[in-house]
Image (cartoon, helix red, strand yellow):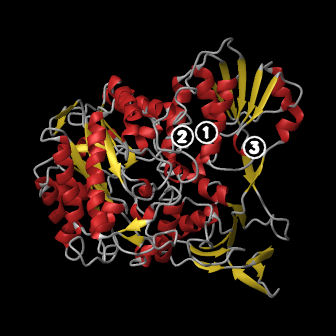
Amino acid sequence: MTLKNLFQPGRIGTMELKNRIVMPPMGTGFADISGQVTDRIINYYAERARGGAGLIIIEATCIAPEGKVVVQLCVYDDSFIPGLRRLARAVQKEGAKVCLQLHHGGRRGARRPAGTKLVAPSPIASWGGEVPHELTTEEVEKLVDDFGQGARRAKEAGFDAVEVHGGNAHLVAQFLSPLTNKRRDKYGGDLESRARFAVEICRRIREEVGPDYPFQFRLLTNEFIKGGVTVKDARRVAPLLVEAGVDAIHIAMAYVPSSEEGYIAHQMPVSFAPMSFPKGAFVHLAQAIKEVVNVPVIGVGRLGEPRLADRVIGEGKADFISMGRPLIADPALPNKAAQGKYSDIRPCIACNTCGTSVFGTYLSCAVNPEAGRESEYKIVPAARPKKVVIIGGGPAGMEAARIAALRGHRVTLLEKGSYLGGNLVPASVPSFKHDIDDLRRYLTGQMEALPVDVRLGKEASAEMVLGMKPEVVILATGAHAFLPEIPGVNKKNVSTAIEVLTGAKTTGSLAVVVGGGMVGCETAVFLAETGRRVTLVTRRPSDFSLKEGLAPDMEPLLRRWLLFELWPKLDIDVVARATFAKVTDEGLVVRDQEGKSRLVEGDSVVFALGLTANKELESVLTGKVAELYSIGDCVEPRQIVHAVHEGADVARKI
């Protein structure tokens, strides 16, 4: 399929772009602690420019010290200009235009320097509970100038454009929202007054950079929360921003599950929409703004599939397409799409490893171990090709095989099952996790495209492996389901979550799912959606709060969606704080905290109590091959990110 729209040149103000693909600003944590540019951040953005994006918007760059949310770039002093200049030139050298986003976290300023105050439009606490200082009118006016000076410095550093961060619950959005702006001066009150801060910032920037310098605005378009900013509000604000000098509007939003509407303390922005959201979920927001402005609109919201992005532009719903997480997963996505090599695009699975990792240390990608390690993680030919045997065709084994083959090793992959994918297969079965299958298809396709000798239906024994005379053996044998040692666990009505999700076993109409973690909850949902009456039994409390209760090991945004949106619609019963006594033909006998027994009725009992690593081959092969490595769940059952990264790491060593 030829993409007729996505690779057409475009214009934002006086800035000519070679295509319609925009990498939006996303925090990385790659700056140094003081906010200066590092080689690591330069390499990261240069790789995305090399991959073919038309415009790279550099992550939120703080215009005042107290506005830092995480470890991030800063632009509040002229001393930051030399580093920013190096960054701008590196991106431009690789063929992309580069824009710097100007940011202030407001009441979210968790990483501000010691001695600075947490500030906001009004003294309303954010997620951390700290009540911010209410900015005085004079302090607001000073911040307007701080944004202007940040734009001046960006221009001096050689950036092609600047963008104001006016979304995702940061300072400018906090002024726009009636939920966080209770002011009574000229910056509070009706919508136009709440938008005054944003409008004045735009006018001040235009004064600083002149009439021809490109300048765009990231606009909070919908908070999806009762009493918050609506699309109707954003349609009134956007023309005011354009009148004040803005050359493009970049869509932003926030989201709170409906059962917690109005509970602003737990508001979570959906700039990282979980995989439960449909692709293109927020195109309608771009279309709504496009109808009221005469400048380009940048659409967002799970638009990383190139053919979908092309269609959105062709239908006139957006002028440019933001691809954030997809360009973390595969920086070369634009070049591959332009060449029609869709199966070679490493897919983003919307797992949000990138979003959650930044708040801990620095950005990491579950499917792309190279993200943030571009300089030291390049694939280089092996000094001497070796005979490599990999046992296990899950994500760890396939990633190891992929890298080893690219490096020139002679690779054989043994998989005891009839298909590749390992636990990616059951993980992708729930209706809201189909994106995981994109990763399975990509890795399987790479096995077919590369010189990897894949042998299915081969359960490896020590004798078999040693008979192949390998120089390197990589064990990716995964893990098996854990079953408790209780009476009746071997009955015919017992199955594991993996067996149910893969279709190896079926349940009756009345199912008992044992285990309140992520897999147990997902299995309960899967069975309920396919018409079963389900009871979930768990040792955990049944509290659905954010801090405890069901599925604590699930990605936070996806967990919120599961528990607050999907779960209430399925009528799943929960037996909480229970221990498991025995399985009978009638169901599961449990004991409560007082030791009292009861029967939870069901014609099927499905255990989802975790996995146990398969270590048998490791124990018998140790010392018998020159190089022996274990990766993925056979080391310890964990997540996709660990499997893929360990496979990549080992294959680069050998």
Residue for badge 3: 634
The amino acid type found where label 2 is placed reads: Val
Count residues near mark 2 (Cα–Cα under 10 Å), then give few for <14, some for 14-19, many for 20+: many
Where does the image place residue 197, in percent across and percent down from the top left?
Answer: 24, 63
Answer with the quarter of the image where residue 402 lies: top right
Count residues near mark 1 (Cα–Cα under 10 Å), then give few for <14, some for 14-19, many for 20+: many
User: Quick check: can you spot residue 273?
Assistant: no
The numbered disc on residue 367 is 2
N-terminal of the pair, mark 2 or mark 3, is 2
Where does the image place residue 274, in percent across and percent down from the top left?
Answer: 45, 57
Give the position of the C terminus as an image quadrant.
top right
The numbered disc on residue 644 is 1
Give the position of the N terminus as an image quadrant.
top left
The amino acid type found where label 1 is placed reads: Val
Q: Secondary structure at mark 3?
A: helix
307 vs 112, left or right, is left
The amino acid type found where label 3 is placed reads: Cys
- CA gap, disc 1 and disc 2: 6 Å
Q: Are marks 1 and 2 in contact (CB under 8 Å)?
A: yes
